[in-house]
Amino acid sequence: MHMVAFTKGHGTGNDFVIIEDPDGELDLRSEQVAALCDRNFGIGADGVLRVVRSAALPEGAAALAEEPDAEWFMDYRNADGSVAEMCGNGIRVFAHYLVRSGLADLEPGSTLPIGTRAGVRDVMRSETGYQVDLGQWRLAGGEPLARAAGLDVARPGLGIDVGNPHVVVALASEEELAELDLGPTPILDPAPAGGANVEFVVPGEPLVRDGIGHVRMRVHERGVGETLSCGTGVAASALAVRYWAGDRAPSQWRVDVPGGTLGVRMFPAEDGEHVALSGPAQLVYRGEIDLV
């Protein structure tokens, strides 16, 4: 047993325990991560962000090969201790922690490359906090049926990959969205081999206002449960609704989640279309805890 310093942070209510471990000396076991995230017996969070130099861990070698300036690597774990590829809210909180702690500089107009298991992601300051380029997205294929508590019948979903897997399901009304019980894990048929985050969305009425699309979303995150927000899920939801809406749909979206509002922007890049996520990031408090 030893004391570990931590910081608690969140992005639109999606909350994280941040542990600074620059030299990669801390080997966090899955049960330790789950204990830290336990809301009754631990600190309480949707996941853990370990702040480690890319050069200090094996996964960081690929990040440095992709971008030599990606000094920092976001080692993200879900609340159940499982490893995740990417977290859109988490990487904004991660960048905010680096800046506030003096570990990195991020001047307006500049970018900060951060290594993740989904590749290097560039973060910039934005009017609402931080914007992250989530990279090239793709349709994951298939239309799995999604069953969830509170839905009368299974609904078809659309597979979207934004560095981690998502299935987006359209609902008919705000009432349907409100009646969902996302405590139990939604059942997907066929089930993705590695699981997926499942988003339930209701397009706005009207869908587009002043050139910006509007969507409301709730999410069940793989390895966590229902969360107040999921950054990559927000991006996947906007991408799915734009896909359903057709070629004349806008490339800028506002997505309302229980924890607030996030912005999504699609734009062309050399390797194909990218999707960016923007929104706030906050650090709440610091402390120490016995890591058993």
Image (cartoon, rainbow, N blue to C red):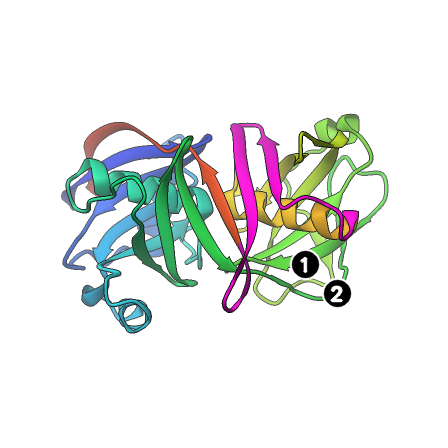
Q: Is residue 252 magenta?
A: yes
Q: Main secondary structure of the magenta part?
A: strand
Q: Nearer the viewer, residue 83 or 97?
A: 97
Provide the residue span drawn in magenta: 245-274
Q: What amino acid is found at the position of numbered circle 2 in the picture? A: Gly
The part of the image, by quadrant, that contains residue 60 is bottom left
Q: What amino acid is found at the position of numbered circle 1 in the picture? A: Gly
Which residue is denoted by mark 2 in the rendering? Answer: 142
Instruction: Find out whether the residues at labels 2 and 1 contact each other: C-beta distance under 8 Å.
Output: yes
Which residue is denoted by mark 1 in the rendering? Answer: 159
Element type where label 1 sits in the image: strand
Q: Is residue 161 visible?
A: yes
Q: Is residue 118 above or below residue 279?
A: below
Element type where label 2 sits in the image: loop
Q: Residue drawn 63% across and 46% down?
A: 251
Give the distance between the C-alpha atoms of the residues marked 2 and 1, in whole angstroms: 7 Å
